[in-house]
Amino acid sequence: MEETRWRIACCAVALTIGLCARLPAQVTLNKNRDLAFGSMIAGTSAGTVSIATSGAVTSTGGVTLIPSTTSSAAFTLANPASGTNRFYFISLPGSVTISSGSSTMTVNGIANDPPNIGAINAGTSRVINVGATLNVGANQASGVYTGTFTLTVFLF
Amino acid sequence: MNERPFFFAARLRRIGPAVVVCAVLLGVASAGAQQAQAGPAAAARQETAANARVVPGLAIQKTQDLDVGEVRAGATAGSVRVGAPSGSSSDRSASGGVALTGSTFSAAQFQVRGAGEASRVHVQLPASTTLSRVGGSETILVQDFQATITPTCSGPQCAAAPLMLSVGATLRIGADQVSGSYTGTFTVTVNEF
């Protein structure tokens, strides 16, 4: 009897992701919430305001937090039941600059929960929470500071 | 002719720090083999905003005293009230034996700066205060203080714009209240919660 060998060809997907193919039609990534540090009084010494991925807010140094609306950023990554099981890799920038007129502040320590790598099987969805630290300068100028950053999710 | 059923095979293979899943679906209906590879690399992106509001700290500044204006006391006791319930303009009313005269009057006005959100500002008012006649000893009781907070600006460009705080009250005028100028003071405190 003729022996037939089935070869399992392993798709050699390069990990150095330079190629960005079209997103598989099924998987979706949507933003639920922006990153909001709320309102604060800048002091005569520099300080920080940190928002954990859980949304908890803490401050250090010369910054005084005042009651206001704060939130971690949140996204939903969804793989429909008709999709194929995949792995994801989350990528975020190291820092972001937010500005009010010519005044700026740096946001760094951008962190995500869940961790960078995980599974997103067909028929499941994941909420990705993003927290960060805002660096407030001494006598930081008053104003509403805004900026944007991009969450990238690579799919395998 | 050989026919083979479709089957699905998956093999996990560790490459470097990441895990790559390779799935191959093979189905053979005839001599020709159909082969499909799943899982090309792809990326999804979402932009999000980051924002913060720096305020200079809560501060209150009086811009107008509470001025009840001129009234005529009658043979029976009464009251006169000055307030600004809508925030922008003052109104005045009298009851009992009190008659309103003159046309100048105003609720007290303050500017509040540094409030992060107007809805979180709490105004503390006295329960009452007492006015004394200048050059005499007669008094007038002031009660029912009420505050109204109104924004002076709306929209995202109003981050540093102050809030306007108006305060009104009611004066108890006695029967045949002695004529003269009556003055006094009261304190308003604002907090943010």
Image: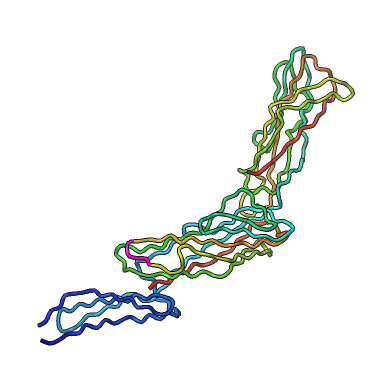
How many discs mark residues in the rendered view?
A: 0
The single residue placed furthest to the top in the displayed view is B75
Please, what is the dominant secondary structure of the magenta stretch? loop
Residue placed at 60% from the left, 55% from the top?
A58
Image position of A149 (left or right of A100): left
Q: Is residue B163 above or below residue B82?
A: below
Tell me: B30 left or right of B151. left
List x then y, in percent, for residue B103: 77, 29
Q: Is residue A14 left or right of residue B103?
A: left
Residue B135 at what x, y percent from top left? 90, 23
Question: Residue A121 colored magenta?
Answer: yes
Name the image quarter holding the N terminus of chain A: bottom left
Give above or below for A46 relative to B189: below
Question: Is B103 placed left or right of A155 in the picture?
Answer: right
Residue A36 location, x and y as percent?
Answer: 56, 56
Q: Position of residue A16 (x, y in %)?
A: 45, 80
Which residue is at the front of the view, A132 or A18? A132
Q: Nearer the viewer, residue A31 or A40?
A: A40
Task: State the residue at coordinates (35%, 68%).
Answer: A25
In magenta segment, residue B25: no
- Vertical placement of residue B92 versus A8, above or below: above
- Of all residues, the one furthest to the right in this rendering is B135
Q: Residue at x 65, y 53 (%)?
A: A40
Q: Quadrant of residue B2?
A: bottom left
Range shown magenta: A119-123
Name the quadrant of the C terminus of chain A.
bottom left
- The figure's colour scheme reads rainbow
Q: Examine the image and state in which quarter residue B118 appears.
A: top right
Which residue is nearer to you in this view: B102 or A60?
A: A60
